[in-house]
Amino acid sequence: MPRDGLSVSETGPADRAAVLELYPQAFPDEDQTPLVSALLDLPAGVLSLAAWQGGVLAGHCLFTEGTAGAARMPVALLGPLCVAPDHQRQGVGTVLVTEGFARLGARGIRRVLVLGDPAYYGRIGFRPEPDIRPPYDLPAEWQGAWQSKGLAGDVEGEGAEAVSLPAPWMQPALWLP
């Protein structure tokens, strides 16, 4: 469960430095700062949420809007998501993601996609995604990591084509081990 006093809000320009400083703390072996910065620079189609605990940034996540299939179904890609080391395992990430679901649903997004740990994301309702392909082929060992959660009724069976995402996500290195 998250700590008392945790609040979630959309980020703004004044939050950018704190957000960009958080990712190396949460992922010291990965450099996600260029991707996060590029996503924050997009003029539209990005939901950037921050979790605050007593005025301190406890976590952050991004949802990038895209489309899937010939019908151009509105979807969003979750990621990156990070939680400050001293706030991990307290439900902060779950709070950010579920708040994102509510806000994205209100925007008409029908499905949220993620490339991540099935054990973690499965707890939040994600399931393997059989219909919508990621922008690049995934290694065999990552197949179960491509997942989705429907936000608007029964969306199964739609798609069967690759997701279309903004340029920052269209780097093959982001989709490989």
Image (spheres, grey):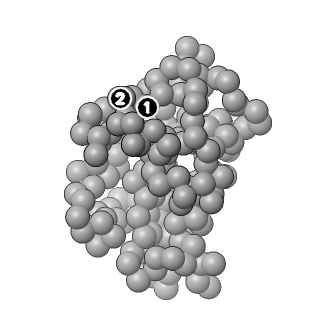
Residue at the spot 61% in from the left edge and 38% down from the top edge: 111
SS for dot 2 = loop
Question: Percent from the top left, x then y, of residue 146?
Answer: 49, 40
Q: Is residue 10 above or below residue 158?
A: below
Q: Which three-letter amino acid code belongs to the residue tagged 2?
A: Tyr
Q: Is residue 11 above or below residue 131?
A: below
Question: Percent from the top left, x then y, of residue 17?
Answer: 28, 66
Crowding near the residue tagged with mark 1, few <14, some 14–19, many ≥20 C-alpha atoms within 10 Å:
many
Can see residue 166?
Answer: no
Choose top left, top right, bottom left or bottom right for residue 112.
Answer: top right
Q: Which mark is residue 136?
A: 2
Q: Which three-letter amino acid code belongs to the residue tagged 1?
A: Pro
Q: Is residue 10 above or below residue 71?
A: below
Q: CA distance from mark 2 to mark 1?
A: 5 Å
Q: Are marks 2 and 1 in contact (CB under 8 Å)?
A: yes
SS for dot 1 = loop
The extreme front residue here reads 141
Closer-to-camera residue (142/163): 142
Crowding near the residue tagged with mark 2, few <14, some 14–19, many ≥20 C-alpha atoms within 10 Å:
some
Instruction: Quadrant for the N terminus, please.
Output: bottom right
